[in-house]
Image (cartoon, coloured by chain):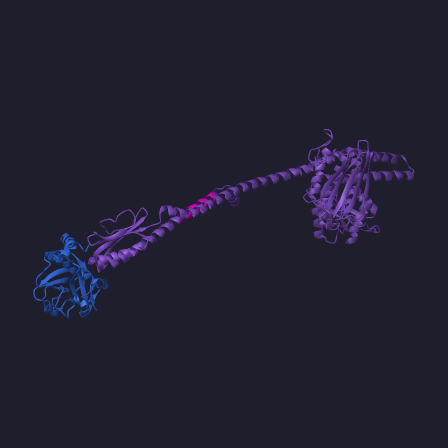
Chain colours: A blue, B purple
Amino acid sequence: MANIGPSIALFALLAAAQGSAARGAQPIEYAVKASYLYKFAPFVQWPQTAFETPTAPLSICIAGSDPFGPALVEAVRGQRVNGHPIVVRHVEAVRSGLACQILFVGGEESGGALQAVAHEPTLTVTDHNKSGAGGMIQFVMVAGRVRFSIDQAAAQGSGIAISSKLLGLAVSVNR
Amino acid sequence: MTPRRVVRRLMTAIAETPAIGIAIACLLLVASLELAYHNESQARADKVRDVTVQARILAASLAGPLAFNDQTAIHEYIDAVRASPEFNAVGAYDENGILVDGFSRMGEPLPQRNQVAGPIVQGDELIVTSAVAQNGATLGSVYVGAATESWSRRATRYLGIAVVVVMACLLVAVLTAFYASASAANRRLQAEIVGREEAEEALRQAQKMEAMGQLTGGVAHDFNNLLMVASSGMELLERTTDPVRRDRLKDGIRQAIERGAKLTQQLLTFARRSPLSPEVVEVGQRIHALQDLLERSLREDVQVEFEFATGLWPIEVDPSQFDVAILNIAINARDAMPEGGRIKIAAHNYPAGGEIRRDMVRLSIRDSGAGIAPEMMDKVFEPFFTTKSVGSGTGLGLSQVYGFVRSSGGEVKIDSVVGRGTTVFLMFPRSSQTLPRADIPADRSHHVEHDATVLVAEDDEHVAELVAEMLRELGYKSKRGATAAETLRLLEETGPFDLVLSDMIMPGKMNGLELAQEVVRREPGIPVVLMTGYSEAAATAAAEGFPLLVKPYTIEAMGEVLGHALHQH
């Protein structure tokens, strides 16, 4: 309980999301995605090389424009996963060596960014991408609710293990 | 008080108080309560552990669905738990502690907010909360309310055992109390038995003295007659010179003295204070020996007849008590015949058969007296019951007979017809032991060793002179020592002697028996003969194996005993 101080702001957003997600309101959809984004962390096992020290921060990098706003930063404040404090970083240009544990690439132009971190232990998360070049986790909308599909093969290729609990919740899994 | 006595008294005190039993019962009760409490807390701990594990499993399962708000999955997991009737209420809460999904079987709704805390018991419900965490990140919590066994059910479960335990405690307490009272009663009974035994012993002695009293009159009369014979005989002896007449007078005097001696012997034996000491006796012989006493305790108008079958079996009784019993019955018979009559004493063997389970000897004493009224028959054996006038009877006679016969393993029966007479039957069991050999037949053909020297130890001057005279008459030489010490000195200095004859009662440090033992120790070759007038001393001497001359004795008896003693050595 000590390492998670749920923020009232996120709580308010979530509450709103549950009620209004069906109406497809854009900000609320992203509020839910923001909360999912950092909640993926406990269900993911990075290789040891991903962190410099056992207490090194776990970085959630937002590539390009930030659809979440300050809500995400607020939500992760004080949160820890396996002893790693969670931090949110904004990255203008995705390149290798950023040391991001989670990389969110919004919009349709994700291919290049994903390519840049393909050989690094980075969990890539993208919105649903019709071009097919999605991240390891892709947000999808199912019956007006935010769900996700998982590309387990890609994650394994980067040395990332995803908990079966998370796999079980996915809309689809590419093994 | 010695430590042993203290311990014994302590044991008695413990045995006679129910305290220890009550203590055991209390201990049992406390132990079962303790055990029940222990069981109960053990069961509760088990239950808490069990429910906690279940809650953790549920929490682990709910981690994903809670994190990603998958209502369907949450509902499925909760439903799965719902299948178990053990859980009254289960709730899943998000990371902010807000209820997401759950159910409650009981009336109470689930709390809207949950806070993770230790397990608590509310009424009959055990509430366990558990955090939903994944890799150190808390994602929510679960609330599980499990039904515990209700008080009433638990009470019912324990009631059976409680009843058994309480019954056992009661039983222990009651048994101990009972044992304590029984033990106290037993001790009182023991004390009473001892008291009664003492009283019975005193009664026996009193009965004997009573019989003695009965005898005294007759004996005094008889003694008077004997003294009359002796004194007048002496007088006449001095006045006549006719040898034939003198011989006849001397015979008369000797006979009178012999009868007197026999009588005093019997009285001494009779009066001896002795515990019951059974000996093997032959009824006929014993009663024949009692004849003199019997005649003296009866009147002249009472005739006594004997009829003893030959080959009577030996019986085992205390001889002096036997004598007293016969005398008591005879005296009763005499008193039943104020006008005189006949007493018939008979004895027969009574082989086993029918109601008699073992060989018995039946002794019957029949009189031709007044008889006993039927209504009195039941009472005649009771102590102090008497039909005689005050002062003439104590009522102890037949009770002595009864006590003696029963303690000898026999039976008493009375058959009586008013106006025709009474018969008392005494039944004694046959003894398996043989009769002790009667006195060694006197060796009449002993030859007097004229050169034999006898050392006499006798303190009484007159008796010593008489003994010396008798010894000379028998052809012995003699020397006398007045004390044991002097006798021993004479034995050392002026021997050799062929025999030592010693009185048993001697002044000084050493009595006759000790002197005899000392002589045997110093000179084993010299026979020692003891003489005494006391029956008890005589018994001691006999027990030590010394030949004995019972005072008063005749020259003939002396010659016989001394000759025998010399002959044997």
Please determine whether, in this image, residue B122 is positioned above or below residue A71: above
Q: Residue B152's x, y, as percent?
A: 37, 46
Q: Nearer the viewer, residue B337 or A157?
A: A157
Q: Quadrant of residue A34?
A: bottom left
Would you say residue B497 sits in the magenta stretch? no
Q: Residue A116's x, y, as percent?
A: 11, 70
Q: Nearer the viewer, residue B76 or B547?
A: B76
Q: Residue B195's x, y, as percent?
A: 61, 38
Q: Residue B350's x, y, as percent?
A: 76, 47
In screen coordinates, is B530 left or right of A1? right
Give the extent of the magenta segment. B21-35
Q: Nearer the viewer, residue A43 or B313?
A: A43
Look at the image and tell me whether residue A149 can be seen. Answer: yes
Give the prevailing secondary structure in the magenta stretch: helix
Q: Nearer the viewer, residue B177 or A18?
A: A18
Q: Quadrant of residue B335?
A: top right
Would you say residue B31 sits in the magenta stretch? yes
Look at the image and tell me whether residue B1 can be seen. Answer: no
Screen quadrant of the C terminus of chain B: bottom right
In screen coordinates, is B3 left or right of B360? left
Residue at point 47%, 42% (across, down): B19
- Count of numbered circles on the image: 0
Please determine whether, in this image, residue B65 is positioned above or below residue B357: below
In screen coordinates, is B277 left or right of B10? right
